Amino acid sequence: MNGSVKRHTPAYPLLLRGLSPLTHLILLALMITSLLPARTRGQDSSNLLAVKAEFVREFSLPGRNNQLLRPAAIHIDRKFNEVLVSDPGHNRIVIFDDNGVYRFEFSGGEVFSTPGDLGVDSEGQIYVVGSTRAGKRLFVFDFDGIYLQELELFTSDGKRVDIGSMTLSEQDELFVYNANQPGITVFSPDGELLREIALFEELSERTLNEMIAGTLTAAQGKLFLPLPSMGMVNLYSFEGEFLQSVGYKGSRVGEMSFPVRAALTPDGLLLVLDKHRHNVLCFDQNYQFIGEFGGRGFNPGWFYHPNLLDVDAGGQIYVGQIFSNRIQVCHLPQVISDRRSPIGGNSD
């Protein structure tokens, strides 16, 4: 060896010996293409079904030490153009305008310790599901945040409703998902029982025990109930008639891994928040899948196990998460908006 070091010659350059520079470039391009994600190859970016969220802004409160802590619910009051946020970490409800500007707040005080679901009726009264030592209860405040009363909610057989989630319709009817005996109880704004809707009567007891229900939403004459463990959203009429299911269980584009909330845009698009896929799935007015936006990430326009969703009168989409105490405002990406089909038509 005469003290010299023999260097190992890589196999790849040997394979390329004798090839022209143009051939080298072609082979290099093929190697790079093979490393690209599968869904981006052979597709124009305008036709992608899964895209980044179109970030607008993030909610922030005045003062460095006065930020949201574990936001638990967000409600858009489209009549008064206000955004209400449950802030359990500070036992308060924080109210912004639809530009994200802080307006005021009020505390749960000694009434409840942890605020949850929110609703606002046509008179501006604010309904808050709050945790107490006796369980979840429903409390009413006026538009200035002054405490008015607790609503005592009971079923027709005299049992107290175990509040799983609560939503308020445009007609001021309170719809409460009863976690005790899976169903929906409907009340007037003063707590009078109006009707009861039985759910899942066809399911076995074992399936019911394993089933998880997301947050109930009333919008545009329909009820939307996400079923995270089943990977779908069930739709019902306000009278309790089952209309259809939307979505399929899965982890690929267009499928639902763990849907937790649903919302409708002003023009009737259905948005479904998937907590485990970290994104929002979009369906047209005929409930045909037209795309999804977001995904796992920590920069603006990306989400991490999001749990809050709502849409304001202008179509801005609000997505909140406990991690980093964030509420982001997004626009529906144009590439998804362009895929919607006419009402009554068929999706491409």
Image (spheres, rainbow, N blue to C red):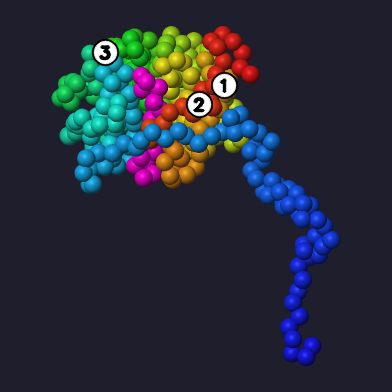
Q: Is residue 184 above or below residue 6?
A: above
Q: Which SS class for mark 3?
A: loop
Q: Residues within 10 Å of mark 3 (few under 14, many from 20)?
A: few
Circle nearer the N terminus (2, 1): 2
Residue 77, position as x, y percentages in the image: 30, 21
Give the quarter of the image for residue 247.
top right
Residue under the point 54% across and 27% down: 335
Give the magenta-colored segment's residue range. 307-327
Q: Is residue 19 visible?
A: yes
Circle nearer the N terminus (3, 1): 3
Residue under the point 26% across and 13% down: 122
Residue under the point 80% across and 60% down: 16
Q: Is residue 272 above or below residue 52?
A: above
Q: Quadrant of the N terminus?
A: bottom right
Q: Residues within 10 Å of mark 1 (few under 14, many from 20)?
A: some
Q: Which residue is mark 3?
A: 122
- Tell me if 18 is positioned left or right of 66 in this view: right
Marking on residue 13: none
Q: Is residue 157 visible?
A: no
Residue 43, position as x, y percentages in the image: 66, 34
Marking on residue 339: 1
Q: Residues within 10 Å of mark 2 (few under 14, many from 20)?
A: few
Residue type at the position of mark 3 = Ser
Q: Which SS class for mark 1?
A: loop
Viewer-side label of 3, 2: 2
Circle nearer the N terminus (3, 2): 3
Residue type at the position of mark 1 = Arg
Q: Which residue is mark 2?
A: 334
Q: Quadrant of the C terminus?
A: top right
Q: Which SS class for mark 2?
A: helix
